[in-house]
């Protein structure tokens, strides 16, 4: 994708009429809510938005997003780099009623005169984030806890089974005749 900056706002009518395509990059200045997540080695979100009208006369915007973020691995609690890619096809509608009437395959984007491309990029990035992040299997170890710092002796004492059977008391009572069957 292009390394040019993406315009902030676009007039819907003009963009759809021209079948305009906008491509560019956004950084932490344009997406401050994601500044802490963007990879310092490549702190840009590449986005491409193409406007048009389908055979049924519905206005749409096709969005493609590519970003690299750094999240916390849920196994080892160390940084994990995630490559995010997303593609959406949005139906441009002025309100909720029209949004409910969109066919399957089109997600609603409620906008009247203009579309905020920076906000759209932020929404696509938020939707592309994984619920939980992990390193690939075998690339990380769980964090050490206080329990892992015990000496070997304490660990053996903790894990060795008791040598006495807990039911031996019952056995002794039965043998002594104190417990009689009723």
Image (tube, rainbow, N blue to C red):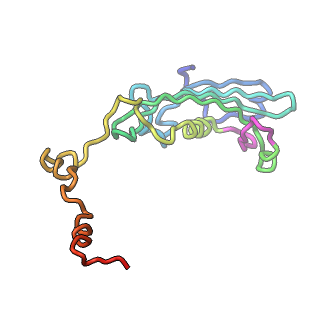
| 108 in the magenta segment | yes
Instruction: Give the quadrant of the N terminus.
Output: top right
Furthest-top residue in view? 2
Percent of width and height locating residue 93 = 77, 42
Give, as a single range, the part of the protein colored magenta.
102-115
Quarter assignment of residue 63:
top right
- Left or right: residue 55 compared with residue 113: right
The structure residue drawn at horizontal position 76% and vertical position 33%, both measured from the top left corner, is 60
Between 39 and 143, the one lying in front of the other is: 143
Between 124 and 156, the one lying in front of the other is: 156
The structure residue drawn at horizontal position 82% and vertical position 34%, both measured from the top left corner, is 58
The structure residue drawn at horizontal position 77% and vertical position 45%, both measured from the top left corner, is 99
Between 151 and 102, the one lying in front of the other is: 151
The structure residue drawn at horizontal position 14% and vertical position 44%, both measured from the top left corner, is 152
- Left or right: residue 58 compared with residue 180: right
Furthest-right residue in view? 56
Percent of width and height locating residue 6 = 59, 28
- Left or right: residue 176 compared with residue 153: right
Q: How many marks?
A: 0
Quarter assignment of residue 4:
top right
Instruction: Give the quadrant of the C terminus.
Output: bottom left
């Amino acid at each position: 994708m292009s390394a040019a900056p993406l315009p902030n706002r676009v007039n819907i009518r003009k963009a759809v009429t021209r079948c305009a395509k906008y491509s560019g990059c956004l950084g932490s200045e344009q997406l401050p809510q994601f500044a802490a997540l963007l990879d310092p080695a490549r702190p840009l979100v590449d986005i491409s938005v193409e406007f048009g009208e389908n055979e049924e006369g519905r206005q749409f915007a096709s969005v493609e997003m590519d970003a690299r973020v750094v999240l916390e691995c849920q196994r080892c609690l160390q940084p994990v780099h995630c490559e995010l890619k997303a593609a959406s096809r949005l139906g441009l509608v002025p309100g909720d009623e029209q949004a409910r009437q969109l066919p399957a395959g089109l997600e609603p984007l409620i906008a009247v005169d203009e579309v905020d491309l920076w906000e759209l990029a932020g929404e696509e990035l938020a939707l592309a984030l994984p619920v939980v992040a992990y390193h690939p299997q075998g690339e990380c170890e769980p964090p050490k806890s206080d329990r892992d710092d015990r000496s070997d002796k304490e660990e053996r004492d903790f894990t060795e089974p008791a040598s006495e059977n807990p039911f031996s008391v019952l056995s002794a009572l039965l043998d002594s005749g104190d417990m009689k069957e009723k």
